[in-house]
Image (spheres, grey):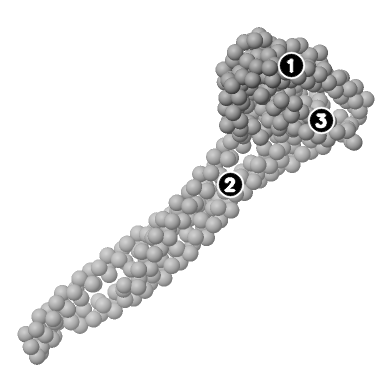
Amino acid sequence: MCAGKHLLCFLILSIITFSVAAQKSKSQLQKEKQQNLAKIKEVEKIIGETSAKKKNSLGELSALNERIKEQEKLVRSIKGEVVLLDSEIGENTDIINALEDDLAALKKEYASMLFAAQKANNSATRLTFLFSAKSFDQLIMRLRYMKQYAETRKLQAEQIIKVQEELSVHVTQIKAKREDKNRLLNEQLSATNNLTELKRKQHALVKSLEKQEKKLRKDLDETKKAVARLDALIEKLIKEEMELARRANNSESITLSNSFEENRNKFLWPVASGFVSQKFGRQNHPVLKGIVQQNNGVNIQTQEDQKVKTIFQGEVRRVAFIQGLGSTVIIKHGEYLTVYAGLKEVFVRSGQKVTTNQEIGKVFSNAEGVSELRFQIFKNTTALDPQIWLKNM
């Protein structure tokens, strides 16, 4: 009987430990899935804005690529939930089997005890057993034994009820988990079918854009010229600021620089929604083969009329219009500069002090319906990868 009791205690402890660990994983997976769904909804809106203005554009392709990436994350997340449920179902099945074995052993032991008790229930037999004691101490011990035996039988019956109840709970749980698994498998099938359809659209869009090579090359040349103008403006400003800093030797600037560095990987994004449509550094053109583009920051494709906000306190050092890119705001944070290019409206002026998360303008949308912010971070003359400095979006 003791062995059965210990086994039950061990099973209950195992159940609690497994449930806590599994719940944490399940909670995390469900959270990731909700984040994927929210991001998918956001990207769908961006795709709608770009395709409404012009079908088959690079902006639409960027948004579609991001949509596929998020759909792949969703499929992985659902698969993770299915794997976890399989593990939980397997664990529950093992527990049910162990409980059933334990219950059978307890019932067998209890039946033996009942049979022995029925034989001993005869009053003459009990009296004979008691009064055949050779001493008073032995008589007392036999009385105690009979009492303990009765209590043990009662405990054994209670133990059987507990195991039956525990077994019932786990049978109910495993049924619910199997229903959850079937629901998730349907979700997974639907998500996978959507992913296949998105990839089909992506392939068709790339093929369509490849036929527009002449226009794409012309647009690329114009963008390169606009970026060169922006680079020249930034380079000139950096030289001016470094010369001013050399003369001033300002301790306040050093403090601000240190504070900026302390917030590495903690800065909020300059726009509330969107995705990185072009990363930092050398990037292959999404359609034109053999064409590599250099990006000194990141391009963030977002929704129409998105407000642009500062990532940190500082001073506006330049507000300028760049042909082909729209308005640009450059903010100084000690040794650091942040650049916000591609604005249609600007809410600040040169020389103005700004605070963290302050609105400085609105994103410009081009003729193809693409709303894209060019965001850059410099430390003196060195361009830095903004994604290393910003929090995960």
Q: Whole-percent x and y of residue 340? A: 70, 20
Asked if the residue under mark 2 is in contact with the one under mark 1, i.e. CB atoms within 8 Å, the reply is no
Gap in angstroms between the C-alphas marked 1 and 3? 24 Å
Mark 2 packing: few (<14 Cα in 10 Å), some, or many (20+)?
some
**Residue at label 2?**
184
Which amino acid does the dot numbered 2 rest on? Leu
Query: Is 18 placed above or below 10 here?
Result: above
Labels 1 and 2: the sequence-earlier one: 2
Gap in angstroms between the C-alphas marked 2 and 3? 43 Å
Quarter occupied by residue 386: top right
Q: Quadrant of the N terminus?
A: bottom left
**Residue at label 1?**
240
For this view, does 70 lie left or right of residue 324?
A: left
**Residue at label 3?**
294
Labels 1 and 3: the sequence-earlier one: 1
Q: Whole-percent x and y of residue 254? A: 60, 24
Taking the spot 53% from the left edge, 44% from the top edge, the residue there is: 28
Which amino acid does the dot numbered 3 rest on? Gln
Tell me the element at label 1.
helix
Residue 186 in view (yes/no): no
**Residue found at the far left of this picture:** 136
Taking the spot 77% from the left edge, 26% from the top edge, the residue there is: 59
For this view, does 83 lie left or right of residue 13?
A: right
Q: Whole-percent x and y of residue 72? A: 68, 42
